[in-house]
Image (cartoon, rainbow, N blue to C red):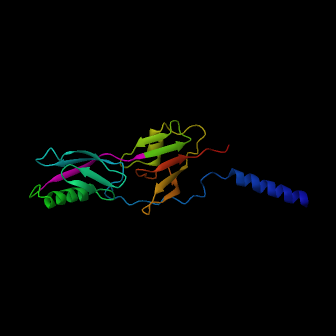
Amino acid sequence: MQSRRVFSLMLLGAVAACASPGANLPLLPEVPISAYRIGPEDQLRVTVFNDPRLTGDFRVGDAGTIALPLIGTVRAAGLTTSEIERAVEKEMRDKNLFRDPSAAVQVITYRPVFVLGMVERGGQFPYQPGMTVLTAVAVAGGFNYRAIQDYVSVTRIGPDGRAMEYRAKRDSVVQPGDTITVFERRF
């Protein structure tokens, strides 16, 4: 009877040891497709019609703002490009630079994604709209021979500023700033 109990405990321990890493993480929530929200480290091109002095490329700082000549700082983080266009135009009107200003804003460079773990070349990679876990891993050289290829861990900064770790499938859509970790197989 005692040997049967010891054998059962050993078998239970072996099964627990075989549990895949990250299998207990919550699933990555689906993010509805909407206009891209700007964040720190995004690089923007601001074009002001009829004034090349105000036109240029600007990086969104850690404070979530861009510094424009003659205008000053404009909040950008959390806004869409069209919302930033309206904010720039409002600042130009408020400072009496133009009566009817016209500005255009486009994203030149997105925040990067980070891929680490069991990939060929982990590191920081440029985000592209519509990027999935599988395309991010492909940019990192693909899975190596020891990788679990069915799911990964995605660490994402939530709206409250806290990092949360999730389990994501290969076709899950990633966002700029996500950290993707590819797990190692046990056997």
Residue at image x 60%, y 55%?
23
Quarter that holds the C terminus? top right
Q: Image quarter for residue 24?
A: bottom right
Q: Image quarter for residue 135?
A: top left
Say above or below: 164 vs 131.
below
Q: Is the magenta stretch mostly helix, strand or loop?
A: strand
Position of residue 91 measured from the top left corner of the image (x, y, whole percent): 18, 58
Determine if the magenta segment contains residue 106. yes
Q: Which of 6 and 40 is in front in this view?
A: 40
Residue 143 visible in the picture: yes
Residue at image x 42%, y 41%?
125
Position of residue 36 measured from the top left corner of the image (x, y, whole percent): 32, 55
Q: Nearer the viewer, residue 44 or 148?
A: 44
For the view shown, which residue lies furthest in the left direction? 99
Residue at image x 76%, y 56%?
12
Residue 170 visible in the picture: no
Quarter that holds the N terminus? bottom right
Determine if the magenta segment contains residue 48. no
Position of residue 61 measured from the top left corner of the image (x, y, whole percent): 34, 50
Is 85 situated left or right of 9 in this image? Answer: left
Residue at image x 44%, y 63%?
160
Q: How many badges with numbers are in the image?
A: 0
Q: What stretch is highlighted in magenta?
A: 101-112
Position of residue 6 measured from the top left corner of the image (x, y, whole percent): 85, 57
For the view shown, which residue lies furthest in the right direction? 1
